[in-house]
Amino acid sequence: MIWNSIDMLPAIFAMAQPAGNGQANPPWYVSMFPLFLLMFAFYFAILRPQQKRQKALDTMMKGIKAGDRVTTSGGIIGIVVTVRERTVNIRSADTKLEVLKTAIAEVSADTEATPATT
């Protein structure tokens, strides 16, 4: 006869120690302390750094101005010509492109600050 694990659950629970061995249960906050500690560690290890990166990205997006050298997420390097609410026009070699601000991965220094190459 083959035993299913579901059929054995009542038998397994019946073998467990009775709850009252003369010791009182600890308060709820003592048993929940590991969960609180895990949530605290999760916040500072994952959520907080992500919030800092997002804040830096928002600051970068708001600080884009004409003349900045930018790199898009697709790898296009160009110089900002005009800035609109959601898009940016960039000039790359002899091409003028309109890209979303969210596609900009990096803003380098102004073109006036970089030496001209010939």
Image (cartoon, helix red, strand yellow):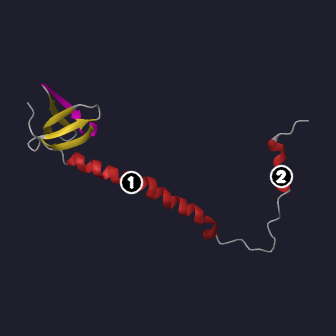
Residue that appears at 83% across and 64% down: 18
- Image quarter in which the C terminus is found: top left
44 left or right of 89 in image: right
Task: Name the residue tied to disc 1.
Answer: 49
**Between 14 and 48, the one nearer to me in the picture:** 48
- Where residue 13 sits: x, y (%)? 82, 54
* Magenta highlight: main SS: strand
The magenta stretch is 94-103
Label 2: few (<14), some (14–19) or many (≥20) C-alpha neighbours in 10 Å = few
Q: Position of residue 6 (x, y in %)?
A: 80, 43
**Residue 103 image label:** none
Residue found at the very far top of the displayed protein? 94
Q: Amino acid at mark 2?
A: Ile
Q: Quadrant of the N terminus?
A: top right
User: Residue 72, how many percent across, how many down?
Assistant: 25, 35
The mark found on residue 12 in the picture is 2
Does label 2 or label 1 sit earlier along the sequence?
2
Count residues near mark 1 (Cα–Cα under 10 Å), then give few for <14, some for 14-19, many for 20+: few
Which quadrant of the figure has residue 104? top left
Is residue 15 or residue 45 the one in the foreground?
Answer: 45
Q: Is residue 3 left or right of residue 92?
A: right
| SS for callout 2 | helix
Where is residue 26, by image quadrant? bottom right
As drawn, 50 above or below 69: below
Q: CA distance from mark 2 to mark 1?
A: 45 Å
Amino acid under disc 1 = Pro
